[in-house]
């Protein structure tokens, strides 16, 4: 009678660069070897710039070497769909990719995944809110795995003063996937590594306890800490205390943002502009005011070189950088900022009489995208930080610059359309407000967005406000046009939508003429 077939236990790890996936794999291998087992690991490099993780594949034969009588199993070099016993993903989307590729199956796979997000290039570059809907990924993880251990392991690591791969190793040790590898073997593997042993063991224990407890589904999010502001800003905020809570929270955030961005009078201008929408908002929950206040705060705090310098020299940013790389107090940290200011960024701070001729000269010679300066400033040094700090202190002259005046004119024109639309129909005003999503960033991104907005304004918004197009039809058409412009910023998809809208309106116009 033949012996029952014994197959290797398979472990697949997906981790992004810098998250210690290779170290985690080494720990698993060393733990298996410490337990007297045969083990093999391979890795497949990922793609840079957050478009794919590096995957590590481990096969462990569950029978001790001492019992094999010289026989050796044949290990595979690459995982097969439906043949993975343990899947570890260092980030939620990586778990989704593993599920999509068939590496997680309900009959055999235990899934350990961190629920924190590191946004992909596609999510970051989307003209609107391109963030992944996490709900389907979480449901798939629960439904398509034998057991899913989902938790914010990164936050657990930060809380323990450790690194995430150590916490993930602890969670792995707490599962039943490797019963022949005891906890002391994992501890021995960490000690054998010889680096940051104390903090790694602390993280390992945190992950082990998290997996063993019933709290492995989610770690509560931290409460929002409001930044300290001056008494003058608080008095401004108190002016909106009678608004509904959701509206008041948005406006309060806008006031704080714009006072920090420019000054108190700019924040007061923000409140004045919001009050114009509030006066014509007939919705019961003041939802028009809420969304207009949100988009208005974003538009008024447009990105320029001064804002970039302000954010990069903020104390909170350096604290965050040190926390992310886990620098101990007193440990030196070097930070290099790579900047590429162009002629548009320079002209934004110049008076219009100087900026306009320069921009026309560059545009006529197709130099707008070519005239730029590549800079690498070490803001961790005195001279580099001082240069960036001085640039951030140019806030007072921003009001004198060409772009500031242009932005205020565009904002007032948009706000006027919103108010007129609100008097016509709330749904029309809501879609006009949404057009603000097209205008963001600087350089080519800003130019494309504003050009698309102008096309929508001329083709749809103006006719609707003039009474030449039914409000409901206009609102639907604007919604489709904005979606097309966000999906395809070069304007080709938007042109198709606008052309289709124009063709659909011709019969109605002809009928009216008869």
Image (tube, rainbow, N blue to C red):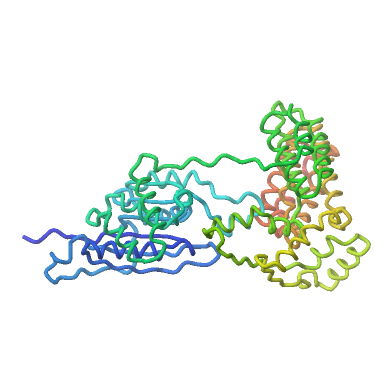
Q: Which quarter of the rendering shows the N terminus?
A: bottom left
Q: Residue 351 location, x and y as percent?
A: 90, 60
Of all residues, the one furthest to the left in this rendering is 1
Q: Is residue 2 above or below residue 295?
A: below
* Residue situated in front as seen by the camera: 330 or 213: 330
Q: Residue 240 location, x and y as percent?
A: 76, 31
Q: Residue 391 location, x and y as percent?
A: 78, 61
Q: Which of the 4 image quadrants contains residue 253?
A: top right
Q: How many marks?
A: 0
Left or right of 302 in this view: 172: left
Q: Which quarter of the rendering shows the C terminus?
A: top right
Q: Residue 221 location, x and y as percent?
A: 52, 41
Name the residue at 44% across, 65% down: 54
Of all residues, the one furthest to the right in this rendering is 353
Name the residue at 54% across, 42% down: 222
Task: Confirm whether residue 443 shows in the render.
Answer: yes
* Residue situated in front as seen by the camera: 435 or 67: 67
Name the residue at 84% across, 60% down: 349
Task: Confirm whether residue 509 shows in the render.
Answer: no
Name the residue at 72% across, 51% down: 438
Q: Is residue 334 above or below residue 455?
A: below
Left or right of 380 in this view: 7: left
């Amino acid at each position: 009678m033949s012996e029952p077939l014994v197959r290797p236990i398979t472990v697949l790890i997906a981790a992004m660069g810098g998250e210690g996936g290779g170290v985690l794999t080494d720990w698993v291998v060393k733990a298996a070897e410490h337990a007297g087992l045969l083990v093999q690991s391979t890795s497949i490099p990922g793609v840079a710039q957050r478009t794919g993780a590096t995957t590590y594949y481990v096969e462990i034969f569950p029978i001790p070497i001492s019992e094999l009588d010289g026989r050796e199993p044949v290990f595979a070099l690459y995982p097969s769909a439906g043949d993975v016993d343990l899947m570890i993903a260092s980030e939620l989307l990586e778990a989704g990719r593993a599920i999509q590729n068939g590496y997680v199956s309900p009959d055999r796979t235990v899934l350990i995944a961190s629920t924190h997000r590191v946004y992909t290039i596609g999510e970051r570059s989307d003209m609107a809110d391109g963030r992944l809907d996490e709900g389907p990924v979480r449901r798939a993880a629960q439904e398509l795995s034998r057991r899913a251990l989902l938790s914010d392991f990164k936050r657990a690591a930060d809380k323990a003063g450790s690194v995430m791969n150590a916490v993930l190793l602890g969670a792995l040790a707490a599962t039943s996937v490797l019963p022949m590898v005891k906890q002391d073997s994992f501890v021995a593997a960490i000690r054998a590594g010889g680096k940051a042993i104390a903090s790694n063991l602390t993280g390992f224990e945190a992950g082990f306890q998290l997996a063993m407890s019933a709290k492995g589904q989610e770690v509560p999010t931290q409460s929002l800490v409001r930044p300290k502001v001056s008494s003058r800003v608080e008095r401004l905020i108190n002016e909106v205390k009678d608004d509904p809570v959701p509206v008041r929270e948005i406006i309060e955030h806008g006031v704080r943002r714009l006072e920090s961005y420019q000054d108190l009078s700019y924040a007061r201008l923000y409140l004045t502009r919001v009050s114009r929408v509030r006066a014509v908002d007939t919705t019961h929950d003041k939802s028009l005011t809420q969304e207009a206040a949100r988009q208005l705060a974003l538009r008024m705090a447009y990105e320029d070189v001064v804002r970039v310098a302000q954010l990069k020299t903020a104390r909170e940013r350096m604290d965050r950088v040190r926390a992310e790389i886990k620098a101990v107090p007193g440990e030196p940290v070097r930070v290099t900022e790579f900047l590429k200011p162009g002629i548009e960024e320079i002209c934004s701070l110049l008076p219009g009489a100087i900026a306009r001729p320069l921009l026309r000269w560059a545009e006529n010679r197709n130099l707008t995208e070519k005239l730029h300066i590549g800079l690498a400033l070490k803001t961790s040094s005195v001279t580099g930080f001082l240069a960036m700090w001085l640039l951030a202190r140019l806030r007072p002259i921003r009001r004198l610059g060409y772009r500031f005046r242009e932005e205020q004119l565009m904002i007032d024109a948009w706000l006027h359309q919103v108010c007129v639309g609100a008097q016509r129909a709330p749904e029309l005003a809501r879609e006009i407000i949404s057009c603000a999503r097209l205008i963001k960033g600087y350089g080519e991104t800003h130019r494309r967005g504003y050009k698309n907005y102008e096309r929508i304004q001329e083709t749809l918004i103006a006719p609707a406000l003039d009474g030449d197009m039914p409000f409901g039809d206009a609102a639907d058409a604007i919604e489709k046009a904005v979606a097309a412009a966000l999906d395809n910023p070069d304007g080709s998809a938007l042109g198709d939508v606008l052309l289709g809208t124009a063709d659909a309106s011709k019969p109605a116009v002809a009928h009216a003429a008869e």
